[in-house]
């Protein structure tokens, strides 16, 4: 029973994580279509300021995901309830998943640094727009 419960919980958590990632991708796509001129070829500074603020927050939250992914992956290797396997997709050979996860962790560490830098740039750009406004000419 306990094993069955763990399996159900693991599946539910995985589906929830995938759904959240799908929603993120859909929201990013919608914002891209708005920002790339699909509706209007302009974006006044106050709107851009708000968009940049939300991008900064989103980048920080993505960074949280990126920083915690390696921990979750390593824990999956150490959990006695799971049997983790790894297969080279080109050769079909079984391999130790540890070195793969170490490489993933290295890439994600670099990605986290880039996300930090991107959030900083969004904040700098937002600050430069902080004094701008607009009036509609009649």
Image (tube, rainbow, N blue to C red):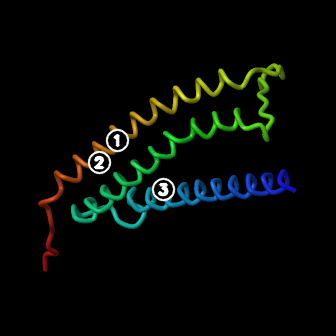
**Which residue is found at the position 77% from the left and 28% from the top?**
86
C-alpha gap between disc 3 and disc 2: 16 Å
Using residue 83 as the reference point, say whether residue 79 is left or right of it: left
**Residues at marks 1 and 3 touching, judged by CB atoms closer than 8 Å:** no
Q: Which residue is mark 1?
A: 118
Quarter holding the C terminus? bottom left
Q: Which residue is mark 2?
A: 122
> Is disc 1 placed on a helix, strand or loop?
helix
- Camera-nearest residue between 129 and 3: 3
- Label 3 packing within 10 angstroms: few (<14), some (14-19), many (20+): some
**Which residue is found at the position 59% from the left and 24% from the top?**
102
**Relative image position of residue 16 (x, y in whole percent):** 65, 58
Location of residue 85 by image quarter: top right
Location of residue 119 by image quarter: top left
C-alpha gap between disc 1 and disc 3: 16 Å
- Label 2 packing within 10 angstroms: few (<14), some (14-19), many (20+): many
- Camera-nearest residue between 68 and 21: 68
Using residue 86 as the reference point, say whether residue 121 is left or right of it: left
Q: Closer to the camera: disc 1 or disc 3?
A: 1
Q: What is the residue that sits farthest to the front in this orientation?
A: 2
**Relative image position of residue 107 (x, y in whole percent):** 52, 28
- Label 1 packing within 10 angstroms: few (<14), some (14-19), many (20+): some
> Is disc 3 placed on a helix, strand or loop?
helix
Q: Which residue is mark 3?
A: 28
**Relative image position of residue 27 (x, y in whole percent):** 50, 60
**Residues at marks 2 and 1 touching, judged by CB atoms closer than 8 Å:** yes
Residue 136, above or below 36: below
**Relative image position of residue 46 (x, y in whole percent):** 22, 65
The earlier-in-sequence mark between 1 and 3 is 3
Quarter holding the N terminus? bottom right
C-alpha gap between disc 2 and disc 1: 6 Å
């Amino acid at each position: 029973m306990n094993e069955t419960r763990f399996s159900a919980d693991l599946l539910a958590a995985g589906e929830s994580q995938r759904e959240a990632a799908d929603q993120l991708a859909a929201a990013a796509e919608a914002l891209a279509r708005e920002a790339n001129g699909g509706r209007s070829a302009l974006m006044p500074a106050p709107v851009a300021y708000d968009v940049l603020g939300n991008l900064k927050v989103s980048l920080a939250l993505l960074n949280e995901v990126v920083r915690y992914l390696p921990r979750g992956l390593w824990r999956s290797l150490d959990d006695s309830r799971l049997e983790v396997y790894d297969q080279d997709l080109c050769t079909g050979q079984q391999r130790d998943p540890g070195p793969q996860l170490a490489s993933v962790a290295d890439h994600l560490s670099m990605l986290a640094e880039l996300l930090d830098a991107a959030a900083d740039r969004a904040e700098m750009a937002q600050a430069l727009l902080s004094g701008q406004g607009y009036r509609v000419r009649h």
